[in-house]
Amino acid sequence: MGIETALYDEPAWYDLLHESGTKEEASLVLDLFRLHGNGGKEVLEPACGTGRLLKFFQARGFRVTGYDINERALAFARKRNRHARLIKSGMTRFCEPESFDLAFNLIGTFRHLMSDADALRHLALTARSLRPGGIYIVQFDLSDYDGQQDDEETWDAREGKRAIDHVMISIAPERKKRLEKILHFLTLKEAGKSKVLKSAYDLRSYDLPQWEALVARSPFKIIDAMIHPELGPGVRDGVFVLRAKR
Ligand SMILES: C[S@@+](CC[C@H](N)C(=O)[O-])C[C@H]1O[C@@H](n2cnc3c(N)ncnc32)[C@H](O)[C@@H]1O
């Protein structure tokens, strides 16, 4: 049994872990695009990882582009999504002016941007990459600094002879520091062997006023929002549809 360090470096296991939520997550994006979008066919996923969500859009006739900084995730995505454009790039660098109708960024990935400057740069580049009427859908957990507590979540997934057990611990952020520490412990089991994989990283936290203030300083405005009741103590799921102010 070995100890490894990055969940993002294990794309096949990452995908298995997220498989049960993929259809529901992608369907929500598609529904929101049908409601608020411009009817176009060009989709962009910043920080696309394994491309699991892009695959859903490709199967429904969209042309898809994704970018990520992780080579291993991209290699996995390229093998699986042969007709997708998959590019090595970062959220503070990628821009293809007026090229996409829909962009999306789910499961808290936006919170990998660790400063206002980086988040604003990313929003500006993404706004510039959208065609007129294009939308950017962003989903992440919103913090409530007065109520949020450290939390532990467990889930597992299985496929044939492969199985994964997952424990995720989040350390509640402080309003001023805005750092939520995330720890993942994964037990990967295959062909009678198992190994433990450990990931630790910080995510930037947002409460609703912090997020609204950020968007107000960007080229986007929020045109729709769905904020779900508490997921855990002091945490709510926020889904936001952004369109450029122009
Ligand atoms: C939680 S995963 C999400 C992957 C994919 N979007 C999904 O929903 O399955 C976060 C991804 O963000 C990527 N990432 C983190 N920081 C990034 C950055 N600054 N620019 C581009 N990709 C980044 C990681 O490599 C990882 O693949």
Image (spheres, rainbow, N blue to C red):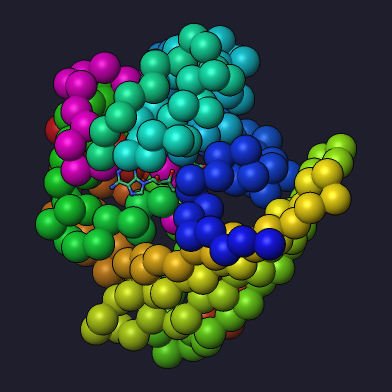
Residue at 52%, 87% in the rendered image: 149
Q: Measured from the top left, where is residue 16 in percent x and y?
A: 69, 42
Location of the N terminus by quadrant is bottom right
Height in image: 172 above or below 218? below
Residue at 67%, 49% in the rendered image: 17
Residue at 30%, 63% in the rendered image: 211
* Residue farthest to the bottom, as pictured: 146
The magenta region covers 91-108
Residue 35 in the figure: left or right of residue 186 = left
* Residue farthest to the front, as pictured: 1
Height in image: 182 above or below 71? below
Residue 145 in the figure: left or right of residue 194 = left
Residue 38 in the figure: left or right of residue 23 = left
Residue 17 in the figure: left or right of residue 4 = right
Where residue 90 sits, quadrant-wise, is top left
Residue 120 within the magenta-colored segment of the rendering: no
Q: Measured from the top left, where is residue 167 in percent x and y?
A: 66, 69
Residue at 26%, 81% in the rendered image: 177
Magenta stretch prevailing secondary structure: loop
| Residue 176 visible to the viewer | yes
| Residue 38 visible to the viewer | no
Residue 105 within the magenta-colored segment of the rendering: yes
Numbered circles on residues, count: 0
Picture quarter with ligand 1: top left
Residues 23 and 134: in front is: 23
Residues 172 and 4: in front is: 4
Where residue 81 sits, quadrant-wise, is top right
